[in-house]
Image (spheres, rainbow, N blue to C red):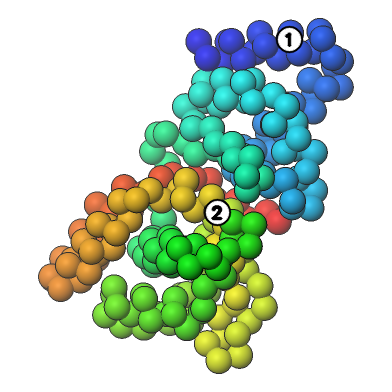
Amino acid sequence: MSSEIALRELKDIETKTSTDYADSLRNTAAFLLQKQWVWKGKRGQKDHFKLCEDNLAYFRKLFDGLDMEWYYDRNFGYVGILPRGSGKQLDIISTLFLLILRKMYDAEASLGRTELGCVTPPTAELLNQYEQVRGDMPLITETNNALENLRRKGIIEIGIKDPDTKLHKVTVLPNITRVVDQSYIGMLNRFIDSYTSDSALGEADCEETNAIETAEVYDDSAE
């Protein structure tokens, strides 16, 4: 029903504007389905953001019909979608880093260390937090792969490499609060508890990974 309403609205928009404008809305919807997040200040995405902002009701109904949650944040300048149903799961290391980054985001934000809603936590502290949860340090290759995975999902940005940690600078984007809700502290605690048992990896992978919305987002390897 929602998709039918959105289709009728698109026809109405086309009648009031032009075929080219309606095609632009279709292109923006396709872009969102591929990238999941559109940023006002990101190169090549400003026009998509403006179309979303000018047609909030249409896009909300469209993605509701596709069983997706629609998000619009005027303050930080982004729109995005998250599937409601099941989808591709994050691997265990990526999931852990996601939860830790959400925790670090809140800590940095509480101290006012934000820039346009983004935070850049120390990479050394990221590794320390992982060790506290898992009990051992991750391999650099595993860490970089996990962070690249989260970058592709539009949750973080990756910058230059730190010569000490051999890790790239990580900028956590404000939409991480949409992807991981306040239950992340409980998830981290359960991860810590699970790693003290023999069935650690299996329990964490099956239970906690399924609980995170980001485990259901599309894997976009395109720039």
The alpha-carbon separation of the residues under discs 2 and 1 comes to 34 Å
User: Which element carries disc 2, helix, strand or loop?
Assistant: loop
The C terminus sits in image quarter:
bottom right
Three-letter code for the amino acid on which mark 2 is drawn: Pro
- The residue lying at 60 percent from left, 85 percent from top is 162
- The residue lying at 18 percent from left, 66 percent from top is 194
Q: Position of residue 116 (x, y in %)?
A: 64, 57
> Would you place residue 218 above or below residue 7 in this image?
below
Q: Is disc 1 surrounded by few (<14), some (14 to 19) or many (20+) residues within 10 Å?
A: some
- Which residue is tagged 1? 11
Side (left or right) of 86 relative to 118: left
> Would you place residue 22 above or below residue 178 in this image?
above
Q: Position of residue 78 (x, y in %)?
A: 64, 44
Q: Number of labelled discs?
A: 2
Q: Position of residue 55 (x, y in %)?
A: 69, 24
Residue furthest toward the bottom? Answer: 164
Is residue 35 in view? Answer: no
User: Which element carries disc 1, helix, strand or loop?
Assistant: helix
Q: Position of residue 107 (x, y in %)?
A: 43, 66
> Would you place residue 120 above or below residue 42 in this image?
below
Three-letter code for the amino acid on which mark 1 is drawn: Lys
> Would you place residue 214 above or below residue 157 in this image?
above
- Which residue is tagged 2? 174
Foreground of the two, 98 or 200: 98
Residue 46 lies in quadrant:
top right
Which dot, 2 or 1, sits closer to the camera?
2
- The residue lying at 29 percent from left, 78 percent from top is 132
Residue 118 lies in quadrant:
bottom right
Foreground of the two, 50 or 88: 50
Of pointers 2 and 1, the one earlier in the residue sequence:
1
Q: Is disc 2 surrounded by few (<14), some (14 to 19) or many (20+) residues within 10 Å?
A: many
